[in-house]
């Protein structure tokens, strides 16, 4: 059927929807630019996501029109069908993405998909490693299951809305607030008990004591003034006190510069630990949701199969693409089918082993690279991985989900307070003709000590996560970084863990050691 005839039939269908402005739509269709479908608003929704759900619905509509059976469950609501028809009409007005007389529904969808993934790659929205993980999902049943489950989980959570996500994140928020307050109390217990005015006290001790008073509720300006008075900075002579008071008045730290009281500090911490769409916080929310819906065993299975790299790639896909109109299961399976059958991943599909390995090497730390080189050279434990060993690894990962979310929130608190301290210190005047040079030492020492105290607080707050990380590091040193190895050499689910380890070691050994060593020297 010719394009004009198809367009006429689609317009007749759309005319049945009272909400569609047909003349306005025809005018909009005429302006579609095939070279900019990601920028034109044709394939991109208001939030910037590519509307792959509409492409999937339209592919199924075309299959049904040709007498076939759709591969996805058709939407119960009529709106996704209407939107898919509008999208099809817009794309059909271009030579590149129109439905050709010799087309099949899947071939039409693949042309769109190939272009999208080409642009994702050019913009590095999906890195070479990301596309390698997608290729594994398309070719390997184990990775297919991991990716499909991860994407389904993301879509289910997003479907429930931002309020649900924030509610699910509340335990991590509470844990962060508790960790911060506990760390403050631990640090306060170490503060010297030598009070201001004690002739035996050193300047640092007095500064720490004053900062301790700040945590007890004293205004930070009063805490700083106590430490400066202790070193008798510029207070000598007839007008010394007046000059010093004028200095303090002129350099008063305000609430919008730094939390001036402990109450303001805790209020700012509370604001900083609110949910953000970071990988760590989202992963923790997903696990909490999985527990609520009795799906946590599937996530733990993903860790146990060392396929956790599917998780961040699924997150990226959910951020780049909208699957509105499709059920979560259908969306995941449809995307995997498209990845397998289209040319969207041809670049990584045709890449040699070295290119694939380098794509992963570029994303790992030096410690992980050292462990990988030990694995490659046979210096890690071989043989079957027992159930107890895998369970220990899985539980280590599960515990880290919450701890990583807490750490991510704490990093926001630390970044905010550090930048505020830097700005406040820069605001306080430096010595001039009327201020003794000793004043420089007093100001610098106060902020140096303040930074030191907060650094101790944040290190203490992160101690549990670091302990858990060390437990996983011990596993990686003993057996190798198997989750990284799994991306380089995916395990066939029919192959035992011991046989896979030997196969992976052999394949990595066939790549020049220079490829690994040059990255270790960076």
Image (cartoon, helix red, strand yellow):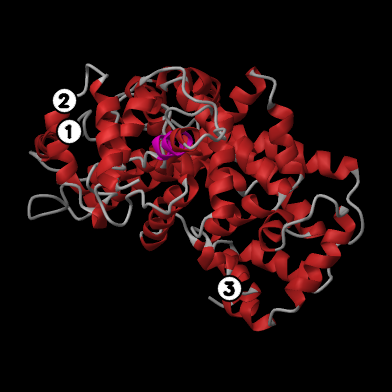
In this rendered view, identify the residue nearer to me: 411 or 476: 476
For the residues labelled 3 and 2, the Cα–Cα distance comes to 51 Å
Residue in the image at 32% along x and 29% along y? 83
Image coords of residue 125 (percent x, y): 41, 54
Q: Is residue 231 visible?
A: no
**Residue 174 in magenta stretch:** no
The answer to whether residue 47 is above or below residue 34 is above
Image coords of residue 341 (percent x, y): 57, 54
Image coords of residue 400 (percent x, y): 64, 38
Q: Mark 1 points at which residue?
A: 25
Of mark 3 and mark 2, the one earlier in the sequence is 2
Of mark 1 and mark 3, the one earlier in the sequence is 1
Q: In the figure, is residue 55 to the left or right of 181?
A: left
In this rendered view, identify the residue nearer to me: 485 or 177: 485
Magenta residues span 52-60
For the residues labelled 2 and 1, the Cα–Cα distance comes to 6 Å
C-beta proximity under 8 Å, tags 1 and 3: no
Q: In the figure, is residue 25 to the left or right of 315?
A: left
Tell me the tag on residue 355: 3
Secondary structure found at label 3: helix
Residue in the image at 16% along x and 36% along y? 26
Secondary structure found at label 1: helix
Q: How crowded is mark 2: few (under 14 residues within 10 Å), some or many (20 or more)?
A: few
Disc 3 versus disc 2: nearer the observer: 2
Q: Name the residue under label 2.
A: 21
C-beta proximity under 8 Å, tags 2 and 1: yes
In this rendered view, identify the residue nearer to me: 129 or 111: 111
Q: How crowded is mark 1: few (under 14 residues within 10 Å), some or many (20 or more)?
A: some
In this rendered view, identify the residue nearer to me: 26 or 320: 26
For the residues labelled 1 and 3, the Cα–Cα distance comes to 46 Å
Image quadrant in which you'd find residue 485: bottom right
**Residue 58 in magenta stretch:** yes
């Amino acid at each position: 059927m010719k394009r004009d005839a198809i367009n006429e039939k689609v317009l007749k269908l759309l005319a049945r929807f009272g909400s569609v402005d047909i003349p306005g739509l025809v005018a909009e269709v005429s302006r579609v630019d095939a070279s900019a479908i990601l920028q034109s608003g044709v394939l991109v929704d208001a939030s910037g996501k590519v509307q792959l759900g509409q492409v999937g619905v339209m592919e199924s509509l075309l299959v049904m029109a040709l007498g076939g059976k759709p591969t996805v469950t058709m939407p119960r609501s009529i709106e996704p069908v209407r939107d898919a028809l509008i999208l099809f009409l817009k794309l059909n007005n271009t030579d590149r993405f129109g439905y050709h007389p010799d087309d099949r529904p899947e071939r039409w969808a693949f042309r769109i998909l190939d272009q999208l993934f080409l642009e994702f790659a050019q913009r590095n929205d999906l890195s070479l490693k990301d596309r390698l993980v997608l290729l594994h999902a398309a070719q390997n049943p184990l990775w297919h299951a991991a990716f499909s489950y991860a994407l389904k989980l993301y879509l289910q959570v997003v479907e429930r809305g931002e309020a649900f996500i924030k509610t699910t994140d509340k335990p991590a928020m509470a844990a962060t607030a508790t960790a911060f307050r506990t760390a403050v109390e631990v640090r306060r217990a170490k503060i010297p008990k030598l009070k201001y005015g004690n002739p035996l006290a050193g300047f640092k001790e007095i500064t720490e004591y004053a900062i301790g008073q700040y945590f007890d509720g004293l205004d930070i300006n009063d805490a700083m003034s106590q430490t400066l008075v202790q070193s008798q900075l510029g207070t000598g002579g007839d007008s010394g006190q007046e000059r010093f008071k004028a200095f303090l008045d002129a350099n008063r730290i305000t609430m919008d510069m730094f939390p001036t009281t402990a109450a303001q500090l805790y209020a700012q911490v509370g604001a900083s630990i609110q949910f953000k769409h970071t990988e760590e916080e989202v992963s923790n929310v997903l696990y909490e949701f999985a527990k609520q819906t009795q799906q946590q065993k599937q996530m733990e299975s993903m860790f146990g199969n060392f396929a956790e790299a599917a998780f961040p790639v699924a997150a990226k896909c959910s951020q780049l693409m909208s699957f509105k109109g499709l059920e979560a299961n259908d969306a995941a399976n449809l995307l995997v089918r498209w990845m397998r059958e289209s040319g969207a991943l041809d670049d990584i599909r045709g890449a040699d082993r070295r290119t694939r390995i380098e794509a992963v090497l570029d994303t790992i730390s030096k410690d992980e690279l050292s462990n990988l080189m030990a694995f490659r050279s046979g210096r890690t434990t071989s043989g079957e991985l027992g159930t107890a060993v895998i369970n220990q690894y899985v539980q280590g990962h599960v515990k880290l989900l919450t701890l990583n979310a807490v750490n991510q929130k704490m990093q926001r608190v630390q970044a905010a307070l550090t930048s505020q301290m830097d700005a406040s210190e820069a605001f306080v005047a430096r010595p001039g003709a009327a201020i003794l040079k000793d004043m420089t030492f007093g100001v610098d020492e106060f902020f140096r000590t303040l930074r030191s105290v907060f650094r101790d607080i944040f290190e203490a707050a992160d101690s549990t996560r670091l302990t858990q990380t060390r437990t996983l590091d011990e596993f990686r040193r003993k057996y190798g970084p198997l989750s990284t190895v799994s991306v380089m050499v995916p395990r066939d689910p029919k192959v035992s863990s011991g046989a896979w380890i030997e196969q992976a070691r052999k394949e990595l050994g066939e790549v020049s050691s220079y490829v690994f060593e040059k990255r270790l020297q960076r």
